[in-house]
Amino acid sequence: MSHLPSSSRRNFVKSLSAGIAVGTVAGGFHSEVPAVGSEKKSLGVALVGLGSLSTKQIAPGLSKTKHCHLAGIVTGTPEKEKIWSEKYKLDASHIYNYQNFDKIVGDDAIDVVYVVLPNSMHEEFTIRAAKAGKHVLCEKPMANSSDECRRMIDACKAASRQLAIGYRCQFEPHHLRCTEILRKKKLGAIKSINADFGFAIGDPKQWRLRGPLAGGGALMDVGIYALQACRYLTGEEPISITAQETKTDSVKFAEVDESIVWAMNFPSGIVAHCSTTYSQNGLNQVHVKTENGFVKLGPAFSYEGIQAESSTGPIQLPAVDQFATEMDEFSMSIQENKSSKVSGEEGLRDLKIVEAIYRSCRSGSTVSLVS
């Protein structure tokens, strides 16, 4: 989850609303796709959106990577251009704004565009980046709807560019070890899962509480981590959803969900009970019960300090920068010409489930995911 200053985001949205239309229509797109040479061992990454997540997590993570590096930035704030260019020694030729973004097609120093924008803008900039011949890493949630996800996937395929979603926990050692234990049934078959992630959100004017920009509230922002964990820990896809939404502040959360609890039924009989909220700190765990024991993660989804244990004892593994490992994996996928395990299709699967959760909240009934 990225927590961005509301003032900068408000200015960003104002400048972007006109810029997208101008840049897309007037600038046009180039269909020629420059190839990434096999001899290029470190890929250049351009960050689109320089809010809190880019500033505090992604850019520092890039400094720790082995297979990629910060090569450019895209921002609607001139002050940030100066700060970032000085801090990261970026030449002006690799700095773009939202109006001239499409000129990135001619920048051979940039191989990958990392989209770190409000959710409603993911589709726009993923498609523009792909048509400019760049591979795309897009922050979660992938988009505001499954239809948007499909268009993003189609655009990247048409441009022969790779698309991956920022599911950092799929590269975190404790999550990987827990997945291995559970998938190999080292403690017997999974019986049930409890997964929760939430926090008390602050500024009521921030973009995350604006429906058109965020697409949803706690579920889209942090609940998707719990949803994802249930999917990769089990290796199964849910077949039905039952969900319920609760609001304690109808003014602050007028446009988005505040708290949601939901149950997912899986083909093998596993039931996952999940929750997410924007009104309470401390929800950050996964507890899996198995035939012969348990596996726990807690804190489970933080940027750092993740801990895990099983019924056989603590799971102690070295800490990693999750963003560095995520970006290195994508860079290697590109250079080896293989799809990332967090591809656009993975993001689409999550959005289809998210939509089912919202449908269940509205209808008050169970929603089937079996076509």
Image (cartoon, grey):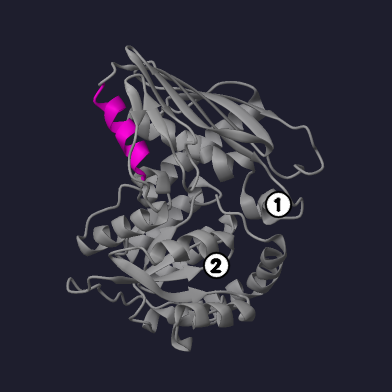
Q: Is residue 307 left or right of residue 276?
A: left
Residue 28 appears in the figure: no
Q: Secondary structure at mark 1?
A: loop
Could you tell me the amino acid type at mark 2? Answer: Gly
Whether 46 is drawn above or below 207: the answer is: below
Q: Which residue is mark 1?
A: 210
**Residue 66 image point, x, y percent:** 28, 64
Q: Which amino acid type is marked by label 1?
A: Arg
x and y percentages locating residue 40 in the rendered image: 22, 74
Q: Judge left or right: residue 176 versus residue 11.
A: left
Q: Looking at this view, is 191 or 150 the one in front? A: 191
Labels 2 & 1 near each other (Cβ < 8 A): no
State which quadrant residue 265 falls in. Answer: top left
Query: Crowding near pointer 2: few (<14 within 10 Å), some, many (20+)?
Result: many
Depicted 227 relative to depicted 72: above or below: above
Query: Which residue, as the protein is rendered here, is positioned at the far right?
Result: 251
Image location of residue 119, percent across then percent down? 57, 55
Label 2 element class: loop
> Considering the image in quadrants, where does the C terminus appear?
top left
The range drawn in magenta is 172-185
Please state which of the two labelled residues, at mark 2 or mark 1, is closer to the viewer: 2
Horizontally, residue 114 falls left or right of residue 310, namely right
